[in-house]
Image (tube, helix red, strand yellow):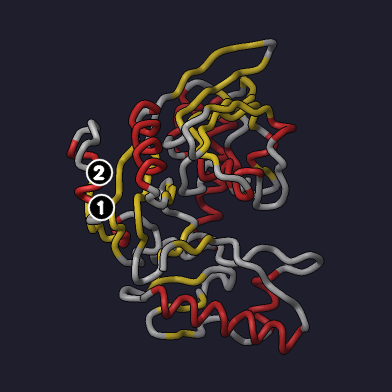
Amino acid sequence: MDIEKQLNNLTIAKDKIYYHEPMTKHTTFNIGGEAECLINIDNEKDLQEVLTVANDKKIPITVIGNGSNILVLDKGIKGITLHIKIENINIQEKEGNIQITVGAGEKLGKIAQKCLQQEITGLEELSGIPGTIGGAVRMNAGAHGREMKDIVKSVKCIDYQGKEKEWKNEELAFAYRTSRFKQEKYIITEVTLTLQKGKREEIKAKMEKYATYRKEKQPIEYPNAGSTFKRGTGFITAQLIDEAGLKGYTIGKAQVSTKHSGFIINQGTATAKDVIALINYVKDKIAEKFGKTIELEIEIMGE
């Protein structure tokens, strides 16, 4: 049955629902086919309703945040793509620490700016990551020696059957670029962080230092999905790619960045097919030259 007919009884505002939506508009890679149906979710009531209907009609669910760590394939995404845009920031002082509770759709950069205004320290290292806090928790995002696991106190989420859960940090199975949310089907709705009071000048100086580093070392002038490959065990993946002479290697319009070999960039009209071909080429060359297996940090979605 046509997905529009399957979803015609949803009470969600029609301006939040998009059919045959190009995912190029919703990913930082600017790559991907159409989402059969994309729904902007800015509250838990809407989320519960969509999950109920999807379960009833057996429609597959895909969840995205800011689209900054994903590659959507060229044929797009079947079923419902939930674009999580739940936004709220609540700051409280508790037991000598600052607790910040935020909606999963809040961008890390915005939260970091709020922390700067309120003289709250602890988020500076992560302030340049171009994702939502829900996505950052899911992959235990990190930069400059700090990861989400270092500041997360607890997380609220909903499973695909609509049941609510709340977990403390130690229950989240945080490890390098992963958490229990990568292994189990839960949608993060709210995150509570534990941070501290700081000094505005120091916080600002740190944020500016990390922003400068990012601008100088990462190819932010091109569409990309962040670091394409994970750090290896006992080796730095970007260094091996460099040593293999692959910096600047191009397939179609996808290129191993000349600025940072750990990134694949979209030179303008790259397809997912180009990116996948380049990923596989790089993986094969590293295995052949160094006997090392490199793993993806980005997630591949769709078909």
Q: Is residue 123 visible?
A: yes
Q: Which mark is residue 3?
A: 1
Residue 286 in the image: state x and y as whole percent: 68, 82
Task: For mark 2, give the secondary structure.
Answer: loop
Task: For mark 1, give the secondary structure.
Answer: helix
Q: Residue at x 49, y 82 (%)?
A: 277
Q: Residue at x 56, y 38 (%)?
A: 205
Badge 1 amino acid: Ile
Residue 17 in the image: state x and y as whole percent: 23, 43
Which quarter shows the C terminus?
A: bottom left
Q: Is residue 72 left or right of residue 208?
A: left
Do the residues under discs 1 and 2 have CB atoms within 8 angstroms?
yes
Picture mark count: 2
Q: Quadrant of residue 27?
A: bottom left
In depth, the one of 259 and 267 nearer the eye is 267
Q: Is residue 217 left or right of residue 105?
A: right
Name the residue carrying label 2: 7
In depth, the one of 142 and 166 nearer the eye is 166
Query: What crowding class fits label 1: few (fewer than 14 Cα within 10 Å), some (14-19), or many (20 or more)?
Result: some
Q: Residue at x 45, y 71 (%)?
A: 265
Q: Is residue 141 visible?
A: no
Q: Which mark is residue 170?
A: none
Residue 218 in the image: state x and y as whole percent: 52, 62
Give the answer, above or below, for where 99 lies relative to 19: above
Badge 2 amino acid: Leu
In depth, the one of 96 and 182 nearer the eye is 182
